[in-house]
Amino acid sequence: MKNNEILSQIPEIGEAQIQLLEKLSNAVSVSGDEGEVRSIVMEEIKAFADDVRIDALGNVLVTKKAKVDDPLRVMIAAHMDEVGFMLVDDEGEGLFKFEIVGGIDNRQLVGKPVLVGKEKLPGVIGAKPIHLTTADERKNPIPLDSLRIDVGPGNSKKCKVGDRATFGTRFETWGPSLVGKALDDRLGVATLIELVKHTPDNIELLAAFTVQEENGLRGARIAAYSMNPEVAFVLDSTPANDLPVWDEEENGRYNVKLNHGPAIYRLDAGTLSDPRLINHLVKVGDEFKIPYQFRQPGKGGTDAGAIHKQRGGIPSVSISVPGRYAHTAVLIARKADWENTMKLIFASLAKFNRDILSVDR
Amino acid sequence: MKSLIKKLVETVGPSGYESRIREVVRAEVEKYADEISVDAMGNLIVKKGEKKEGGLKVMLSAHIDEIGVMVTHVDKNGFARFTTIGGVRPHTCYGSRVRFLNGTVGVIGGEMLENANHVHAIEAMYIDVGATSVEDCPVKIGDVAAFDRPFEDLGNRLVSKAMDDRVCAAVLIETLKNVKNSPHELYFVFSTQEEVGLRGATSAAYSIDPDLGIASDVTMTGDTPRGIKMDVALGKGPAIKVKDGGMLADPKVVDAMVQCAQKHEIPYQLEVLLGGTTDAKAMQISRAGMPAGCVSVPTRYVHTPSEMVDINDLNNAVKLLTAFISETIKLE
């Protein structure tokens, strides 16, 4: 395919895509209970997929056939689950003890509205107000076992131990920004839905909408085993820590920056990305003048950490949309970064061929 | 042996970036291999022989990656901040030199410490490559380097930055050269990404699907002044692993190795290592599981730029492995 043809086929991020992202972001889909997002995904992709399967852990595994013979079988993964809470003890009158699911800093919890259970009943993580706290108390974060989710007596019988809860934030757009509670990784899910709808002709797309990423890449592991692809790309969201630092020194620990384009991974806690794939993404980014950045090598990880070790090894790389305040009640991303992520992954797939993998890693 | 080790240890190859060291190994083994392949993880897999009566499919693994660093940010004055690849400990960094894949050499410096008795955190250190700005800095975010220190021959004792695990790559290479008329189908795996979690051996074990897995890796010693309590010493022979932090070696494999060493009058030690693990762990739990063990090379100052081994242990490790895989292996 010629480059101008590829450019003309790149899915646009228009009003419909933003509305879908809103629906995805507002859905409650905490690890292990991803049903609501799964339903949205199934509804969106069913008319476009050649084969759809829901596996034992709840991953949605989609096959979209290529329009060429002997196509490269490419897995693309995005996780449907989000961090959140689970009710663990009913103390009566609508007060529940809870545990954190996935990685959330305790200090982010106090005073936040939440939505509980499949009915999304409103609640709040309450705490003693400033009037009643001592100066000493205010020095330390409140431990989890001193916090409760309070849904009030009215709904107390509709909630039960084992129910999941998330932050109650509703999706909004603020100028160039996308604001929501679960954009990690509904941005990836929305991108992957577009790829199922608009797939480059040259590849067989194996789209994995995965579960339980936030509690240990569990869905991706079995998805990669059963799909057994030749190569894998992971679409995720990664924290931007790009605010100015207090002493006006250079911020050398930004991880990624908003508005600098999709973030390509080299090293995280789970994966050393395949250099052949990194080079391909960079080459395509340069050729199509798509802005991109490298995520600072360091901790954290994506589904790639599980995927690349399956079977005899699967060349893998991750691309993330940057987002400020990840794993809190609010994540802020930029629409332009999402658009450029879409462009980079689409063009990279359209330009992919086996020669890239024929040289040794 | 010494010149082979020098060649191997002086090649830069941190985890995930093993292509150069793989080519060095490939040149050494090509002549002796029946088949050579490189898999998706970059493992070099050398097949030798077919399974005969009483034989097994045996995977032997020594990792060719080494610990290293990766640049996270180059600041406006040209100083490169970095993160670690594998188990790099902060106290080994300050004042060390590193060599990047592109040949650039840098010195690790650190921010001023409030207390000079403290050790710099990794985040408080940087690599100085002699640059003065981002523009004239020859390295950028994502670039990879290994510690840089020349190989030293102290007679019986050898010193280098990457004895872990290039000495065992040398042991496997020599074993491959020596082994003749083995009843086994042998796979010598020069594995990748061991230092970041046995990742190469994991996929190699899956695709080879052997009957028996044997790793060769370095282990610590307890023979230095006020060192750790460990009954392994330099120069007393290769160590047959009983357990480490990630694996309980199959007792039948341990027994078979011990009997082999005794039969051939090869000195050996038994190893109980409290921390750390080897590719044998990945093999042991691959697919439906397999008997696994490890022949270790006692090494002082592991994961510092000056790891020390004894040449006699290496030669005896070659003898032990050669003898072990040349005969039928009884695992009852």
Image (cartoon, helix red, strand yellow):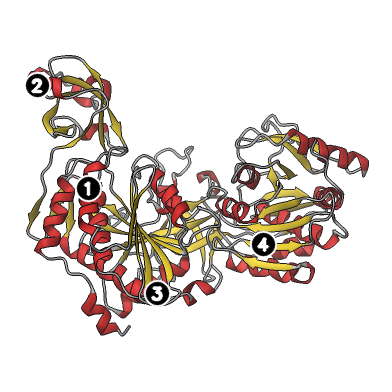
User: In the image, which disc is placed on residue A352?
Assistant: 3
Between the residue at mark 1 and the residue at mark 2, the CA separation in whole angstroms equals: 29 Å
Question: Sequence order check: which comes first, mark 1 or mark 2?
Answer: 1
Residue B290 image position (x, y, % from top left): 67, 42
In the rendered view of the protein, which quadrant contains the N terminus of chain B? bottom right
Residue A212 vertical position relative to residue A193 in the rendered view, above or below: above
Q: In the rendered structure, the residue with mark 1 lies on which chain?
A: A
Between the residue at mark 3 and the residue at mark 1, the CA separation in whole angstroms equals: 31 Å
Q: In this rendering, which labeled residue sits more in front, label 1 or label 2?
A: 1
Which image quadrant for residue A199? bottom left
Task: Specify the amino acid type for callout 3.
Answer: Phe
Residue A207 image position (x, y, % from top left): 34, 59
Question: Neighbour class for label 2 at 10 Å: few (<14), some, many (≥20)?
Answer: some
| Residue bearing the label numbered 4 | B45
Q: In the rendered structure, the residue with mark 4 lies on which chain?
A: B
Residue B238 vertical position relative to residue B174 in the rendered view, above or below: above
Task: Specify the amino acid type for callout 4.
Answer: Ile
Question: Neighbour class for label 3 at 10 Å: few (<14), some, many (≥20)?
Answer: many
User: In the image, which disc is placed on residue A152?
Assistant: 2
Task: Specify the amino acid type for callout 1.
Answer: Ser
User: In the image, which disc is placed on residue A39?
Assistant: 1
